[in-house]
Image (cartoon, grey):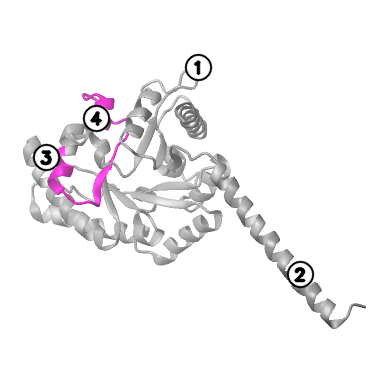
């Protein structure tokens, strides 16, 4: 039996040893973390990649976070409002979705908003109504912890007329978003929005820090996709890695991913690349996996 003094010394030394071991473990974790190579970008999954399954009710929107994590190993998602159109103000539903995502460690990055009117409508009253229709999605995105809502730059008229109208609608919506700490981003989604120079001119016209672009590798018909993405990148706050078909080597047929990724990275973007598979030759799950594999392969080559 040790004396009281020895017992005190013993306990003191034991505590010091425990503290030392704990500190050593923390330092080792830091060293391991510091040694890990920093990824050029992260990968997320756009819900539209599973649109056929969702529209056919083979997949429930509430289960999207689980599918992203367990089926594809992806921990960041981009939602599409079409799959919970009537739930934007349903706090119970939103809370359940957020809980499922949080429990899995899945981050909700943004909500893609469609079918809420034209932000560049020629009729100012309709334009303002379209802006206000997006408020509920901005508030839902804030609740989810998103960084942005994605909107469309739809309008009619000459390029100049549409620029003025779209810029007005975006400015109004971006001011609302700013109060929520939220970005409003425009995807090249048809019409003049698929012309990189035109969309860049709209961004300059709006001239607000929380209004930006979401360059999509696809959605181009009569405009060079590489030129367009380069023109949109100075304003980009998210990127959509669109893919339709792959060759025997696993490369995307319609887009040269190496060339495109170099353009995106050269602009200083290192955020998430959202997988958006839209092909029909292979299944949605296989298309998502193929796109992910390609992104990882090119990321490795460029690192």
Mark 3 / mark 4, whichever is N-terminal: 3
Q: What range is drawn magenta here?
A: 201-229
Mark 3 / mark 1, whichever is N-terminal: 3
Q: Which of the numbered marks, if any, corresponds to residue 13?
A: 2
Q: Which of the numbered marks, if any, corresponds to residue 248?
A: 1
Q: Which of the numbered marks, if any, corresponds to residue 156?
A: 3
Distance in Å between CA atoms under marks 3 and 1: 42 Å
Q: Tell me residue 115's x, y (percent).
A: 26, 48
At x 24%, y 26%, the residue is 227
Please tell me whether mark 2 or mark 4 is closer to you in this view: 2
Distance in Å between CA atoms under marks 3 and 2: 78 Å
Secondary structure of the residue carrying numbered label 2: helix
Residue located farthest toward the right when viewing the structure as drawn: 1
Distance in Å between CA atoms under marks 4 and 1: 28 Å
Number of marks present in the image shown: 4
Would you say residue 188 is visible in this rendering?
A: no
Distance in Å between CA atoms under marks 2 and 4: 66 Å
Distance in Å between CA atoms under marks 2 and 1: 64 Å
At x 16%, y 53%, the residue is 171
- Tell me: 31 left or right of 172: right
Can you say which quadrant of the picture contains the N terminus? bottom right
Would you say residue 301 is visible in this rendering?
A: yes
Mark 3 / mark 2, whichever is N-terminal: 2
Please tell me whether residue 203 belongs to the stretch shown in magenta.
Answer: yes
Please tell me whether mark 4 or mark 1 is closer to you in this view: 4
**As rendered, which of 73 and 287 lies closer to the eye?**
73
Please tell me whether residue 192 belongs to the stretch shown in magenta.
Answer: no
Dot 2 and dot 1 residues touching (CB under 8 Å): no
Residue, disc 4: 228
**As rendered, which of 213 and 14 lies closer to the eye?**
14
């Amino acid at each position: 039996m040790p004396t009281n003094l020895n017992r005190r010394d013993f306990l003191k030394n034991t505590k010091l040893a425990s503290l030392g071991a704990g500190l050593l473990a923390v330092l080792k974790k830091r060293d391991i973390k510091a040694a890990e190579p920093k990824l050029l970008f992260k990968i997320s999954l756009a819900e539209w990649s599973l649109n056929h399954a969702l529209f056919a009710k083979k997949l429930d929107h509430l289960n999207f976070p689980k599918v992203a994590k367990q089926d594809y190993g992806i921990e960041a998602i981009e939602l599409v409002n079409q799959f919970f159109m009537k739930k934007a103000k349903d706090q119970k539903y939103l809370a359940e979705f957020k809980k499922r995502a949080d429990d899995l460690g899945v981050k909700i990055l943004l909500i893609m908003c469609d079918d809420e009117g034209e932000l560049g409508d020629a009729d100012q009253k309709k334009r303002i109504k379209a802006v206000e229709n997006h408020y509920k999605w901005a508030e839902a995105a804030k609740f989810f912890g998103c960084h942005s809502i994605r909107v469309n730059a739809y309008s009619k008229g000459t390029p100049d007329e549409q620029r003025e109208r779209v810029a007005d609608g975006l400015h109004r919506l971006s001011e609302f978003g700013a109060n929520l700490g939220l970005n409003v981003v425009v995807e090249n989604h048809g019409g003049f929005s698929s012309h990189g120079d035109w969309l860049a001119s709209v961004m300059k016209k709006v001239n607000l820090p929380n209004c930006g672009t979401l360059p999509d590798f696809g959605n181009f018909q009569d405009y060079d996709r590489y030129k367009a993405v380069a023109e949109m990148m100075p304003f980009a706050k998210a990127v959509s890695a669109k893919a339709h078909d792959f060759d025997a080597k696993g490369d995307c047929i319609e887009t040269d991913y190496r060339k495109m990724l170099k353009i995106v990275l050269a602009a200083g973007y290192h955020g998430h690349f959202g997988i958006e598979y839209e092909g029909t030759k292979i299944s949605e799950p296989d298309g998502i996996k193929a796109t992910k594999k390609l992104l990882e392969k090119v990321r490795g080559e460029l690192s």
